Amino acid sequence: MYSRKQYIDKMAEKLKEWDNKILQLEKDAKVKKTEISIETKQKLETLRKKRDEGRKKLAHLRESSSDAWEDMKSGFEKSWTDIKTGMQEAFKQFKA
């Protein structure tokens, strides 16, 4: 079981990982083509939106009081799972 700080740090690290993946995909797309296609731009935008949604959820969790932590955590985990699934699907589509 993670402490509150460990849990938040772990989720923040995952967001950084997603940031790095998105940046790498953008670089790869630019190397392959001088002009990124509309479809590629849309896929990247989907990834950014999902990442930003994760950031917002994590910010709410950080701001929660110690008393509300457990209640917030269970709601966050469901949202996080949805965001993570969306990110994974978007990464798969990007590579397709």
Image (tube, rainbow, N blue to C red):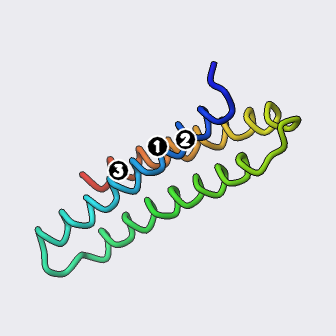
Q: Please provide percent x and percent y for residue 15.
A: 48, 49
Q: Which mark is residue 11?
A: 2
Left or right: where 54 falls relative to 59: left
Q: Please provide percent x and percent y for residue 86.
A: 49, 48
Kindly identify the amino acid type of the residue bearing the numbered disc 2: Met
Choose between 87 and 96: the one closer to the eye.
Answer: 87
**Mark 3 — residue?**
91
Lower position in the chain sequence, tag 2 or tag 3: 2
Give the residue drawn at x 69%, y 33%. Answer: 4
Q: Neighbour class for label 3 at 10 Å: few (<14), some, many (≥20)?
A: some
Left or right: where 72 falls relative to 6: right
Choose between 46 and 55: the one closer to the eye.
Answer: 55
Secondary element under disc 3, as helix, strand or loop, is helix
Question: Disc 2 vs disc 1: Cβ atoms closer than 8 Å?
Answer: yes
Whole-angstrom CA distance, mark 1 to mark 3, is 14 Å
Kindly identify the amino acid type of the residue bearing the numbered disc 1: Lys
Res. 9 image quadrant:
top right
Give the residue drawn at x 75%, y 38%. Answer: 75
Q: Please provide percent x and percent y for residue 39.
A: 32, 70
Q: Please provide percent x and percent y for residue 24.
A: 25, 58
Kindly identify the amino acid type of the residue bearing the numbered disc 3: Phe
**Mark 1 — residue?**
14
Lower position in the chain sequence, tag 1 or tag 3: 1
Whole-angstrom CA distance, mark 2 to mark 3, is 18 Å
Choose between 3 and 20: the one closer to the eye.
Answer: 3
